[in-house]
Amino acid sequence: MSAPSSTDRIERSIVINAPRERVWRALSNAEEFGSWFGANLKGQTFAPGKRARGQNTACGHEDVWFDIVVERVDPQDLFSYRWHPYAIDPAVDYSQEESTLVTFTLTDAPGAGTLLTVVESGFDRVPSNRRLEAFRMHGSGWDAQLNNIARHASA
């Protein structure tokens, strides 16, 4: 098996000026996650093996659905889910494609802050006709989303 390419994973980190418990709640509470991420997840919960789905509420992609299957929930340490990256064309059935894995990890940072790291991996398994665009869009997307959760959790 070959080593992953430089386009197989995106990794971003941010130090958030908020206690770990607060950042964890912003990640693990589905409705709160939706409020900073830009998805209507009202009335939903995140649990391993469970699907969460809601209409996007931002980005000019309001006709697209946020659609994940939760993988792991390790309180205040790790939250992960699988989804189809940059699945924005309502005419395409993405369900036959391999999903990517999104993993958030939390660690303590100096000054009662929290280091939040997100890794999205598995882009090498996305169909070649969409792989590079999905990778590019998610790279800038994760920059924006980490800023969104930082603003939300430290407010």
Image: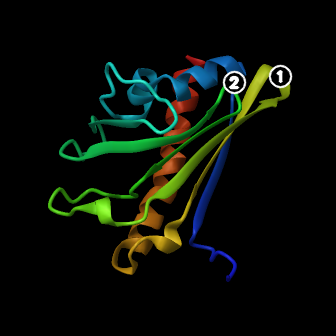
Q: Residue at x 63, y 50 (%)?
A: 12
- Marks counted in the figure total 2
Near-viewer residue (84 or 19): 84
Q: Residue at x 42, y 60 (%)?
A: 137
Vertical comparison of 126 with 27: above or below: below
Q: Is residue 102 left or right of residue 3?
A: left
Mark 2 is on which residue type? Asn
Which percent across, then down, holds residue 107? 77, 33
Q: Give yes or no for contact between labels 2 and 1 (Cβ–Cβ under 8 Å).
A: yes
Q: Residue at x 41, y 65 (%)?
A: 134
Which percent across, then down, holds residue 153? 57, 22
Which percent across, then down, holds residue 88? 26, 56
Which residue of the protein is positioned furthest toward the bottom in this rendering?
Answer: 2
Task: Examine the image and state in which quarter residue 147 appears.
Answer: top right
Which percent across, then down, holds residue 38? 35, 34
- Return the disc, 2 or 1, that comes first in the chain's sequence: 2
Locate the C terminus by quadrant.
top right
Tell me the SS state at disc 1: helix
Task: Measure how far apart labels 2 and 1 are at the Cα level.
Answer: 8 Å
Q: Is residue 24 left or right of residue 111?
A: left
Which residue was labeled with disc 2? 17
